Image (tube, rainbow, N blue to C red):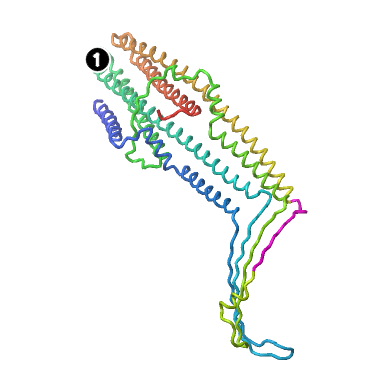
Amino acid sequence: MRMKTKTIFATVVALSLSFAALAQDKQWTLQESVNYALDNNITVKQASNTLLTNQQDIIAAKGQFLPSVNANANHSFSTGNVELFQGQFTNRTSNSTSLGLNVNETVFNGFRNTNLYKQSQLNLESNQLELDRIKDDISLNVVNAYLNILFNIENLETAEAQYEFSQKQLQRVNELVDAGAQPRADVYDAQATLSRDVQSVTVAENNYELSLLTLSQLLQVPFEGFAVEVIEIDSPSEALMYNDVSPILDYALANRNEVKVAEKGIEISELGTEISKAGYYPSVSLGYGFGSNVFYSNLQQNEDPFFQQLNDQKSHRFTLSVNIPIFSQFQNKTAVAKSRIQVENAKLRLEQTKLNLESNIQRAFTDAKAAFRAYDAAKVSLESQELAFNNSQERYNIGAMNAFDLEQSRLRLVNAESSLINAKYDFIFKTKVLDFYLGKPITE
């Protein structure tokens, strides 16, 4: 019997030493965790690369206002019989070289280039807002994972405290049995209770390590040796509770990034309609071309030098092109119609985004109020269970209660302690969500 007790004690000591070893490694603070996630998260990096692409799109859109310049050079060599006069053939070897430079500038194309430039700027602004939204979500996820670790630490401490109590209770029962004050069956009950508490410690330790694993994976850092700084979490108070959801809704609808992204989407779609309408307008462009050529043949003597021929045969060409659309096989009409549908869809997305945001905030507000009431109830329940358990212990010590009833009273106390911890962290996270929607720092 005592060997079994020693085995149980050794198991719990090993678990405690493992927990202590984890605590000796580098401890990540909440702010460090959030900052690291924002700097290294793959989704954030991908969104940042999208911004780099948008910046290149803006440069390309600016380039559409500039003229295009092309140079060309050609050289040809030919040899063989050619008919110089009717019926007279001769063997000729010739070299021909031509050089040219062309410049083209779009003067007017239905404001297409202007609207493309505006659209590229809006795309950059929209994706910047999307990046900010992604960072907000990641920050909230990190805070949630961090709080979950603290929650499991408190659960583990409670389980270890219960184990220590059960161990002392077993020693006390052994003393009473040896003195003949209680039956030996009470020892078996106390041993069973101690075994259950060891199991509870094991489960709590496993939950703690799983919560550490979740945060380490979220940060994308090695799990081995990963540990966090334990923050002292104050007990929830009514001062942390929001009395009215309206200010949160008003702020969120005016400032949340998902709403701004949807609003930018409408502007981008409207510019898309203007770009489609450009197909109805005539396009005007100016062109300039410069060219010259050189020709050598074995049939000619004393030909001018290469550069002399280039100078003598140079030419200039100026062009004005006007393209007036008359019938485009309904391509322009359907393009404008589809772009207008996109505008309507963008407006619907904005409306849906606002509805989703309002729903999430209302739910978070309701959950926070319910969590606070649950915490108050759990606190009162714990006080009652503590009094009931102390009374049960006194009755057990004088022989007025058996071991089974004492264990039932202790289990009610353990459940009350667990409920209080659950309610505490549930309320804290719910208020963090409301802070998040109100634009307050959630790492403080």
Q: Which residues are magenta?
A: 316-330
* Residue bearing the label numbered 1: 176
The location of residue 192, given as percent across then percent down, is 33, 23
Residue 69, placed above or below residue 338:
below
Image quarter of residue 194: top left
- In the image, is residue 323 part of the stretch drawn in magenta? yes
Image quarter of residue 32: top left
The residue at 55%/49% (across/down) is 58
Camera-nearest residue between 371 and 27: 27
Q: Is residue 384 left or right of residue 8?
A: right
- Secondary structure of the residue carrying numbered label 1: helix
The residue at 38%/28% (across/down) is 152
Q: Is residue 353 left or right of residue 83?
A: left
| Mark 1 residue type | Leu
Quarter of the figure with the C terminus: top left
The location of residue 47, given as percent across then percent down, is 50, 44
The location of residue 411, given as percent across then percent down, is 38, 19
Q: Is residue 402 left or right of residue 302?
A: left
The residue at 68%/52% (across/down) is 109
